[in-house]
Image (spheres, rainbow, N blue to C red):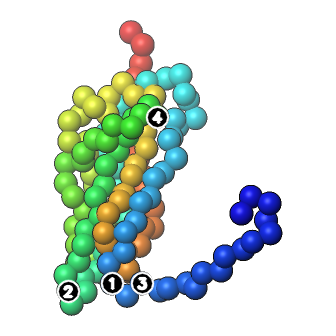
Amino acid sequence: DADGTHVTEKKWDNADDDVWIDIKTRDQDFKDPARRKMVKNVYLTYKLSENENGTSIPTIKYLTNGGTTEYAFNAPLEKNKSDWYTQALKPNVSAQASNVYSFQVRIYGDCFEDFEINDINVVYRDKVLK
């Protein structure tokens, strides 16, 4: 409770099947919040192996300018990648990732317990004033 007098202990339960995840990167402004950018690609390095029941594949989307609207990439994550695999993702509609001040990636949904992310790289270009 609020005054700290009652503590509820819970036992950790290791997952042995699909689990729900919700991973959001920070809203990245690439150290220049006042300049508009055009996001070209996102490279995600991950492992997503398949179990005997099949694999649930998490959804990957992106958000811009601190907003709540989620935009799609051109492809879903691929399953059966038991070794580190780097997938190149492009915004499905390039205009939605153009003229943005910040960019955030969200990965969510059911996935197998062995899903691992190594890194996320965002390739962007600064927009130049004419």
Closest to the camera, between mark 3 and mark 4, is 3
Cα gap from disc 3 to disc 1, whole angstroms: 6 Å
Mark 1 to mark 4 CA distance (whole Å): 33 Å
Residue 66 is labelled as 4
- The residue identified by callout 2 is 53
Residue that badge 1 annotates:
17
Q: Amino acid at mark 2?
A: Asn
Looking at the rendered structure, the secondary structure element under dot 1 is loop
Give the residue type at disc 3: Ala
Secondary element under disc 3, as helix, strand or loop, is: loop
**Residue located beneath label 3 in the image:** 15
Residue 109 horizontal/vertical position (percent): 32, 63
Whole-percent x and y of residue 125? 39, 32
Q: Secondary structure at mark 4?
A: loop
Quadrant into which the N terminus falls: bottom right
Mark toward the start of the polypeptide (1 vs 4): 1
Disc 1 packing (10 Å; few <14; some 14–19; many ≥20): some
Q: Position of residue 63 (x, y in %)?
A: 37, 40
Pointer 3 with pointer 1, Cβ within 8 A: yes
Residue type marked 4: Gly
* First in sequence: mark 4 vs mark 2: 2
Placement of the C terminus among the 4 image quadrants:
top left
Residue in view at x 31 percent, y 42 percent: 70
